[in-house]
């Protein structure tokens, strides 16, 4: 009797906490990974990408920010927000109906995610990423607020005291910047960007079916 073989895929999920499509993409990827198991398993690594690296600590009104950055009107923003809400609902991610309110700097969130990968147990970086996305997009909380960050750390089962040490220092700042530059040099300019086995790129907040098909093809060597 032959024992079924399992293929393990390394997946780098390049994203920003401030990106709603990253929340949709992660939920879609999680659903796809669940579908392909046990024949295919995934090692998820969450990589930093800042959409607004120059954002000040005070943040910016999301409507003003989107108008300035993309030229969108309030009506267009309302429609896009509803589209995002509906897409989130299809993959089980509940967006705050009123939106986020403000755009914030996410550098410290990325530092904590990098720390979670370096010092946390298996799955804790993933849990922290989920908690951060839910706090920001589900409850319109600021990912720049230390209290919000530490609550997410606690939710993920990580060491809150150690997280406070990281936030009070420059730890993992260089690592975040180095990783960001690596992916920018690799041609990543928008997120989410899902990179499988450091070779195959899946762009955007895709539905589970798209991720599933891609994972099966890659695992089969296609």
Image (cartoon, rainbow, N blue to C red):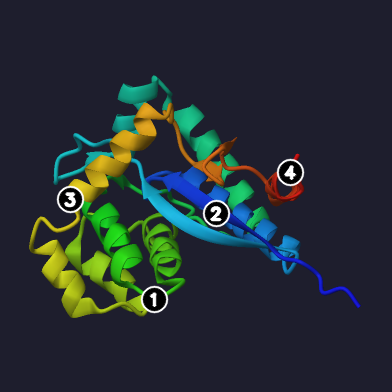
Q: Nearer the viewer, residue 74 or 102?
A: 102
Q: Nearer the viewer, residue 215 or 221?
A: 221
Judged by depth in the image, the label closer to the viewer, 2 or 3, is 2
Q: Residues within 10 Å of mark 1 (few under 14, many from 20)?
A: few
Q: Nearer the viewer, residue 127 or 188?
A: 188
Q: Is residue 158 above or below residue 141?
A: below
Residue identifier under label 1: 121
Residue 211 image offset from top left, x and y in percent: 68, 47
Q: Kindly indicate whether the residue at mark 3 contacts the one at mark 2 (C-beta within 8 angstroms).
A: no
Residue identifier under label 4: 221
Q: Quadrant of the C terminus?
A: top right
Q: Residues within 10 Å of mark 2 (few under 14, many from 20)?
A: some
Q: CA distance from mark 1 to mark 4?
A: 30 Å
Mark 1 or mark 2, earlier in chain: 2
Identify which residue is drawn at 48% across, 49% down: 12
Q: Residue lying farthest right?
A: 1
Q: Is residue 196 above or below residue 123?
A: above
Q: CA distance from mark 4 to mark 3?
A: 37 Å
Q: Kindly indicate whether the residue at mark 3 contacts the one at mark 1 (C-beta within 8 angstroms).
A: no
Q: CA distance from mark 1 to mark 2?
A: 17 Å
Q: Is residue 120 left or right of residue 88?
A: left
Q: CA distance from mark 1 to mark 3?
A: 21 Å
Q: CA distance from mark 2 to mark 4?
A: 14 Å
Disc 4 is placed on an element classified as loop
Q: Kindly indicate whether the residue at mark 4 contacts the one at mark 2 (C-beta within 8 angstroms).
A: no
Residue 114 image offset from top left, x and y in percent: 30, 58
Residue identifier under label 2: 10
Residue identifier under label 3: 173
Disc 1 is placed on an element classified as loop
């Amino acid at each position: 009797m032959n024992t079924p073989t399992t293929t393990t895929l390394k997946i780098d999920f390049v994203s920003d906490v401030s990106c709603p499509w990253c929340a949709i993409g992660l939920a879609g990827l999680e659903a796809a990974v669940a579908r392909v198991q046990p024949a295919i398993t995934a090692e998820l690594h969450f990589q930093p990408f800042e959409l607004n690296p120059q954002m000040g600590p005070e943040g910016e009104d999301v409507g003003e920010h989107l108008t300035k950055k993309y030229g969108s009107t309030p009506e267009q923003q309302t429609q896009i927000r509803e589209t995002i809400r509906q897409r989130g609902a299809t993959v089980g991610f509940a967006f705050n109906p009123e939106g986020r309110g403000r755009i914030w700097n996410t550098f410290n969130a990325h530092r904590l995610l990098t720390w979670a990968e370096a010092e946390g147990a298996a799955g804790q970086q993933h849990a922290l990423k989920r908690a951060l996305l839910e706090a920001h997009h589900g409850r319109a909380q600021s990912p720049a607020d230390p209290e919000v960050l530490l609550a997410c750390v606690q939710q993920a089962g990580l060491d809150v005291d150690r997280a406070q040490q990281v936030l009070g220092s420059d730890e993992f700042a260089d690592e975040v910047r180095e990783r960001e530059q690596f992916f920018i040099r690799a041609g990543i300019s928008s997120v989410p960007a899902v990179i499988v086995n450091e070779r195959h790129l899946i762009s955007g907040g895709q539905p589970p079916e798209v991720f599933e098909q891609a994972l099966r093809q890659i695992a089969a060597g296609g």
